[in-house]
Amino acid sequence: MTSPSALTKTPLKPADLYYEDFHVGRVFQSPGCTVTESAIIDFATLYDPQPFHMDVEAAGQNPLFQGLTASGWHSLALTFRLFQKTGALLAANTAGRGLEKIRWRLPVRPGDTLYVTVTVKEAWPSQSKPDRGLVRMDYATHNQRGETVLSFSCVHILLKRHPDKPFVKNGKE
């Protein structure tokens, strides 16, 4: 398992994947990362300064969380960082078009170990840029008990390995 600070020390290695490699149904799984109390408080102090993310005593009084919890934005950022550790997007990702259906399902607490499963749901060639395609992927972030703590969908714009070749789907152009 990896602490958040160790995530930045491990070099990323591209998986040499391009648009053509993101077939519907393909699944990627990240390594794990254990979330520390100090990481939760540090992130919240900078980006989401609410008592239940920054103050252990105040968080214990919160009727919903009843203890310190990571900011949802922290969980979202960790999710993308963990997926980056797979190397899947490093060779061809040019941008994301946005996130959809973001759901924070369970709180992330100090000591939770998170890992991410990403599933390719849809892929289609760009109509305006023949050197790239679009891929919709569903992200699910799980804790050490296998519970889903966060889920969302993202459309990525990926470069094609062979932009001069026509896109073939089910044997037809």
Image (spheres, rainbow, N blue to C red):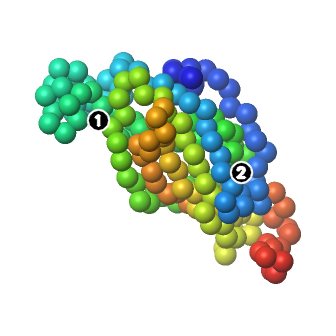
Asked which secondary structure carries label 1, the reply is loop
Q: Give x and y (percent) for residue 3.
A: 51, 21
The residue shown at (21%, 22%) is 55
Q: Amino acid at mark 2?
A: Ala
- The quarter of the rendered structure image containing the C terminus is bottom right
- Residue 64 shows up from this direction: yes
Task: Please identify the quarter of the rendering in which residue 66 is found.
Answer: top left
Query: For the point 52% across and 50% down, which residue is it?
Result: 139
Relative horizontal placement of residue 167, taking residue 148 as reference (left or right)? right
**Horizontal arrangement in the rendering, residue 16 relative to residue 43 (left or right):** right
Q: Residue at x 54, y 56 (%)?
A: 138
Residue 155: horizontal and vertical position, in percent? Answer: 56, 60
In what quadrant of the picture does the N terminus appear? Answer: top right
The answer to which image quadrant residue 157 occupies is bottom right
Which residue is the site of mark 1?
48
Q: How far across and how far down the image is residue 30, in percent?
A: 61, 37
Which amino acid type is shown beneath numbered disc 1?
Asp
- In the picture, measured across the screen, residue 50 lies left or right of residue 115, that is left
Task: Determine whether 67 is above or below 116 in the image.
Answer: above
Query: In the rendering, which numbered label is found on residue 58?
Result: none
Mark drawn on residue 92: 2
